Structure formats: structure tokens, C-alpha cells
């Protein structure tokens, strides 16, 4: 998965097991630092061609729409305290073998 916000970007994969789904990746920040992410998905829902999930503890929400088999165009939302406000971004989720 790749998502870009005005000054941040997220590269991640989601690993599914029989008992849970977990996001593994890195968030790159505008200030030049990066944060490794290994978080469980709090929720995941699929309705027709749409998918929505949130991962903790960052509380980042991913909403997307399936555009082709294995490809989802998505947007990222993260609520931040003032003075930052809401961070938004967009990108694509792609299935990898």
C-alpha cells in the first residue's frame, strides 16, 4: 500500500492470518523522520466495491474503492490535535503475490 499526504507518506502491507489482520509499514514525516508501523487493524468492512479499515494506535482511517482485481484507489484520514487538524492523503492499495 502506498499513500501520500501533503507532507507525509505511508508504505505498508497488510498481513491476514486466521485470527487477525495486521499492518506492517513505515510512515515518512515531513520533518525528515520515519516511524515503523506494526499495528492490528481495529476494524475492516467491505461493501460491494468499497473497503474501509482503521489501524491503531494511530487511528488512521483508510477508505477505498476497488478499481480492478487487486487494485484499490484509497484515501487516508488522520485526526490530529490543533494546530495540525486533519491530515488527508490518497494513494493505491495493490495486491502483491
Image (cartoon, grey):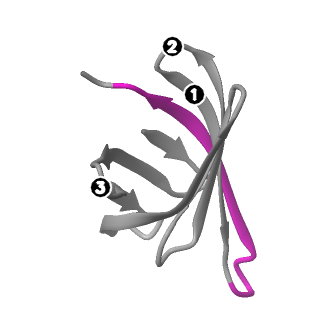
The crowd level at tag 3 (other Cα within 10 Å; few <14, some 14-19, many 20+) is some
Q: In this view, does 57 lie above or below 40?
A: below
Residue drawn at (29%, 49%) of the image: 18
Name the element at disc 1: strand
The crowd level at tag 1 (other Cα within 10 Å; few <14, some 14-19, many 20+) is many
Location of the N terminus by quadrant is top left
Q: Earlier in the sequence, mark 3 or mark 1?
A: 3
From the image, tell me which residue sits under label 2. Answer: 69
Q: Nearer the viewer, mark 3 or mark 2?
A: 2
Q: Is residue 42 magenta?
A: no
- Residue sitting farthest toward the bottom: 82
Q: Residue 30: give x, y in percent of width and height.
A: 48, 64
Location of the C terminus by quadrant is top left
From the image, tell me which residue sits under label 1. Answer: 72
The disc label shown at residue 24, or none: 3
State the extent of the magenta-drawn residues as a range: 81-95
Amino acid at each position: 500500500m502506498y499513500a501520500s499526504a501533503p507532507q507525509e507518506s505511508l508504505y505498508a502491507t497488510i498481513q491476514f492470518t486466521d485470527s487477525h489482520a495486521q499492518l506492517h509499514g513505515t510512515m515518512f514525516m515531513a520533518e525528515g523522520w520515519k516511524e515503523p508501523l506494526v499495528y492490528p487493524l481495529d476494524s475492516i468492512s467491505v461493501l460491494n466495491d468499497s473497503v474501509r479499515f482503521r489501524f491503531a494506535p494511530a487511528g488512521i482511517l483508510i477508505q477505498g474503492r476497488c478499481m480492478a482485481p487487486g487494485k484499490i484507489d484509497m484515501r487516508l484520514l488522520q485526526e490530529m490535535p490543533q494546530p495540525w487538524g486533519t491530515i488527508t492523503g490518497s494513494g493505491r492499495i495493490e495486491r502483491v503475490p
